[in-house]
Image: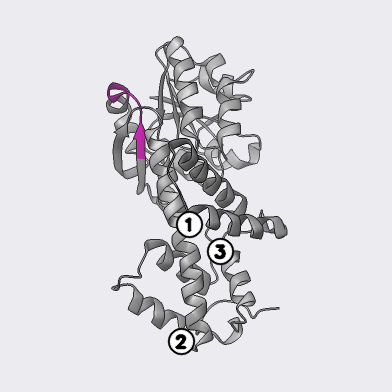
Amino acid sequence: MKVGFIGLGAMGNPMAANLQKAGHELTIHDIRREQGRNLEDSGATWATSPAETAARSDVVLLSLPGPVQVESVVLGEDGVFSGLAAGGACIDTSTNAPTVMRRIAEVGASRGIQVLDAPISGGIWGARDASLTVFAGGEEEAFEKYRPLLRCLGTTVVHMGPIGSGHVTKLVNNLMMYINFIGACEGMALGGKAGIDPRTLLDVIKPSMGHSTFLQRSMKLFLDGEPLHFVTDGAVKDMRLGVELGGDLGVPLEVAPLVETLITRFRDAGHGQEDTLEYIRDYMRRSSVDLANWGSGGFLAAD
């Protein structure tokens, strides 16, 4: 299949690489050509615009920062829909607003283009080893047609319902994830201030009711001195979209707006382009937890 891929960042690049490894003919585009050099070296064709990418492809996948970028890349001048022929498809794997996706799908339908939202979960590790979870929304026929393509990206590919349902699922997932994250920071700070070894604490919480996947992943990465590979600006965007969705649906969210405020405050203090796990370091410092002597591995003393 002739596949276009637009957005070759930390997630998009390895996802595109897996499509290439699966034998698909790949055309790529990003605002920074250097992001796709490894793919070009492996045989991918570089396109100078979203329209050119689409003109060379049967289906175009997107991995972009958010709704503004997706709408511009698809519907803008020289965008995907300017180059994609009737009978083609556009699949958005970004974290996007369901309303934006529905608007794009309406325009696509008027041009004979199938549209799916297929955001993913599993982090950069899942993107690299093709073990992502894919939440898909759109027409059942389109989903079944492109399910094998999405299986090149993830081991779990689920049709969640009509267009926009994938993005709703992703926003629910991320909203819960960051609520868990703030709770993890507070709990680990309490344990650290009381002198509990952090790795032992993680070990005993793992089989207990306080466990969450993000607790284990984020804290272990932090203790090992490894990044999450996701900047704070992205976390703020995800929480904002989740809280906005709650408002649109009339759901009285109470914890999520507070979490959005906390992460936004950290972003506004100059940490927008820092890895999200730097929030842990900041919280531990504010809690007077001595990082230099907290546990046995991997991270630097507080300044």
Residue 226: where, in percent of width, then height? Answer: 53, 66
Residue 93: where, in percent of width, then height? Answer: 45, 37
State the SS at label 2: loop
N-terminal of the pair, mark 3 or mark 1, is 1
- Which residue type does callout 1 highlight? Val
Quadrant for the N terminus in the image = top left
Residues under labels 3 and 1: Cα distance? Answer: 20 Å
Q: Quadrant of residue 258?
A: bottom right
N-terminal of the pair, mark 1 or mark 2, is 2
Task: Inspect this view and state whether residue 13 appears.
Answer: no
Relative to 275, residue 300 above or below: below
Residue range in magenta is: 135-142
Query: How crowded is the residue under tag 1: few (<14 C-alpha within 10 Å), some, or many (20+)?
Result: few
Label at residue 277: 3
User: Is residue 204 rendered magenta in the image?
Assistant: no
Residue 245: where, in percent of width, then height? Answer: 47, 39
Q: Nearer the viewer, mark 3 or mark 1?
A: 1
The residue sitting at 64% across, 18% down in the picture is 77
Relative to 24, residue 133 above or below: below
Residues under labels 1 and 2: Cα distance? Answer: 27 Å
Q: Which residue is mark 1?
A: 255
Left or right: where 211 falls relative to 78: left
Quadrant for the C terminus in the image = bottom right
Query: How crowded is the residue under tag 3: few (<14 C-alpha within 10 Å), some, or many (20+)?
Result: many
Label at residue 196: 2
Relative to 16, residue 132 above or below: below
The residue sitting at 46% across, 32% down in the picture is 98
